[in-house]
Amino acid sequence: MSVSLSPFEARVIGCLIEKEITTPEQYPLSLNALTNACNQKSNRDPVLELDESTVQQTVDQLIRKYLVSEQSGYGSRVTKFQHRFCNTEYGTLKFSAQELGIVCEMLLRGAQTPGELRSRASRLCRLNDVTDVEAALKGLAEREDGPFVARLPREPGKRESRYTHLFGSESVTADCAADDLPECGAQTAAQEGRLTLEQRVMALEADVAELRRRLDDLTGN
């Protein structure tokens, strides 16, 4: 699997996929709309407060990776952006509607249980029950061109294991995909720790951005 996303890149790709599905009349997205989507309070974990400069830098990185493209409409001065991540004429990565909805939710919220994915991804695709989610997860974990998701060791006191996507450094390695082998446990736990650290860094950056915004409001800048 060749796609590797940073946490900010995962957020941008997740937002573009989400808005393509939920508000197709407003897609592709302008930089302002994409920034608002990245900072959205609902359906996001962690909640961020990115400025347009950071989002533009992230988009530029994704353009260099051929995962995002620019689109300028006739007579429009505003550049808009669309993903080339999957299900497009530009690449070979194809997902079913259920797989796409689940991957999108993971890009936006990180690791989740099948029950959480059933509840949250239903706004993006039709999922009749948890068995639909489990079937899609199994397919994503066992695909020949993947795997694209992995099951994490069950947390103490939890009834369900969480699943994470494998599209970035914050994810577990493909060697642990779709199994719960003991030898994968220590490796996965360490990688989950890195995920938590990255989420903390993102949250701290969001706090700093918010403090700067409030300071600018106070000083009138």
Image (cartoon, helix red, strand yellow):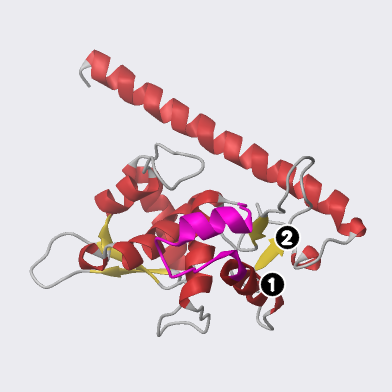
Image quadrant of residue 199? top right
What residue would you read off at disc 1? Answer: 141
- On residue 51, the disc is none
- Give the residue type that dot 2 points to: Arg
Q: Amino acid at mark 1?
A: Ala
The magenta-colored residue range is 111-131
**Side of 56 relative to 130 (left or right):** left
Kindly identify the residue that appears in the image at 16 percent across and 71 percent down: 73
- Tell me the number on the disc at residue 151: 2
| Mark 2 element type | strand
Q: Is residue 10 visible?
A: no
CA neighbours of label 1 inside 10 A, class few (<14), some (14 to 19), many (20+): many
Q: Which sits in the foreground, 196 or 163? A: 163
Spatial CA distance of label 2 from label 1 is 9 Å
Q: Quadrant of the N terminus?
A: bottom right
Q: Is residue 202 above or below residue 161?
A: above
- Say whether residue 26 is visible: yes
Q: Residue at x 47, y 55 (%)?
A: 120
Image location of residue 191, percent across then percent down:
75, 49
User: Which residue is at a point 71% across and 63% down the rendered structure image?
Assistant: 150
Asked if labels 1 and 2 touch by Cβ distance under 8 angstroms, the answer is yes
